[in-house]
Amino acid sequence: MTAHLERSGSAATTSGTTAPPSGCPAHSGARPLSGPGFQTDPARMYADMRREHGAVAPVLLEGGIPAWLVMGYRELRQLTSDPALFTRDSSGWNAWDDIPDDWPLLPMIGRGDTAMVYTEGEVHRKRSLTINNALEAVDPYELRDQAEKYADLLVDAFCGRGESDLVAEYAVLLPALVIARVFGFPDTMGPRLLRSLNEVVDGSRKALKGQKALRAGMMELLAAKRQVPGPDVASRMIVSTDSSRDEEIIQDLMVMFGAGHQSTADWIGNTLRLMLTDERFALSLSGGRHSVGRAMNEVLWVDTPTQNIAGRWATRDTVLGDQRINAGDLLLLGFAAANADPDVRPDRRASTEGNSAFLSFGHGSHRCPYPAQEIAEVIARTGVEVLLDRLPDLRLAVSPKALVWRPSPWMRGLSALPVEFSPAPGGVR
Ligand code: HEM
């Protein structure tokens, strides 16, 4: 390992007989962001790490690659507010020599990637503006109509059976279909894009293949929109630019698709899980629309879809929390852990109603663009509401404890959400 991550203060020891090499987090209590404990109950692991290390903890990514997980609410805001000290540009990472070409987490880090999310300063400001303008022009009423239409079609496909897996047959399909449409894709492209996206987002071995396929789809879209522009995000992004900027736009569309689809899918899935398993929501399932908003807000506090994001890279030696950070170290944005920081939520059982101070959409210049947040909210809320309208006696088909979370270091979402309900005829709305 060439990356140098050190704890400040006294040298840490391990229980082994060999003296630990100084500065290597594998020997200073660094935990892997994976494994059964992390998969089932990351909140407990974050709490343990906070007790051991404070607001910033050493962790290991796939292949033993070291990083810092920033878990303090204050420290996370600090990390995301100072791009001169903590940059989004990964080129200066001090672990690059250890990263194999087929490292599955590579798509989330961006080697040599020039997408807008990896830029800073004026370049970032300009590209961010292009994205904001293109997303801001999405009409929320039309978006709601589109989301309702796709939600109904998806429900039609399984409502007669009286049972379904709401992750595979609903949550993971709806945002991709709606976002693809908003971007300007024809409906027929939906399934192909979806497959590629899922491969990228979960950091599986197929991640690089998925990324290539996604890129091919975006290139096709752009070529089509250069020929015949339409009232869609891709056309708005290429307006008044010549084709020399196509590469930039392809990358930014890919980032938006990736950032938007899986997070919104998990927002839907995690909200449904909460409503189906927590008695505070059980009584209002059939008809209590106001409770959908409450559940969606609570999910952003306790099971936020983007639990961790990579990342920021220190541009010089510094200190964050109680840790000494070296130039080139990778710092992960621990949104889920920061939302549970006892300094902001001393009582974890206290209601989150009306409180939107969570960091789930990020903070600082790279936070999730406001129009993107609105798009996600319209799709997720419509998705949950349509489902509850159509299947009012929806209930979980397994015990809540049998639900399995996907083993991703980045996303928090279920592998499956098996439900039962009274069979209903399709196409009734
Ligand atoms: C539940 C849904 C969503 C969640 C939880 C979410 C969360 C986030 C977070 C935490 C960031 C900050 C990343 C960082 O600081 O490095 C971010 C950035 C971003 N999000 Fe979202 N997002 C969601 C939906 C969407 C949607 C629907 C879109 C687009 C259609 C989108 C587009 C973006 C873009 C372009 C950025 C990068 C901004 C930049 O680097 O300047 N997101 N998102």
Image: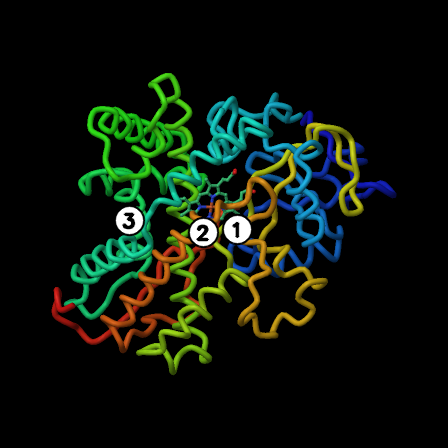
- Residues at discs 1 and 3 in contact (Cβ within 8 Å): no
Label 3 environment density (alpha carbons within 10 Å; few <14, some 14–19, many ≥20): many
According to the image, label 2 marks what residue?
Answer: 373
Label 2 environment density (alpha carbons within 10 Å; few <14, some 14–19, many ≥20): some
Question: Residue 396 versus residue 130: which sits nearer the camera?
Answer: 130
- Residues at discs 1 and 2 in contact (Cβ within 8 Å): yes
The image quarter in which residue 337 lies: bottom right
Does the closest atom of ligand 1 sit within 8 Å of the Cβ of label 1?
A: yes
According to the image, label 3 marks what residue?
Answer: 178
Tally of numbered discs:
3
Going from N to C along the chain, the mark reached first, 1 or 2, is: 1
According to the image, label 1 marks what residue?
Answer: 361
Asked if residue 170 lies left or right of residue 50, the reply is: left
Q: Dividing the image into 4 quarters, which one contains the N terminus?
A: top right
Q: Position of residue 75 (x, y in %)?
A: 71, 48
The span from disc 1 to disc 2 (Cα, nearest Å) is 8 Å
Residue extending furthest toward the front? 240
Element class at badge 3: helix
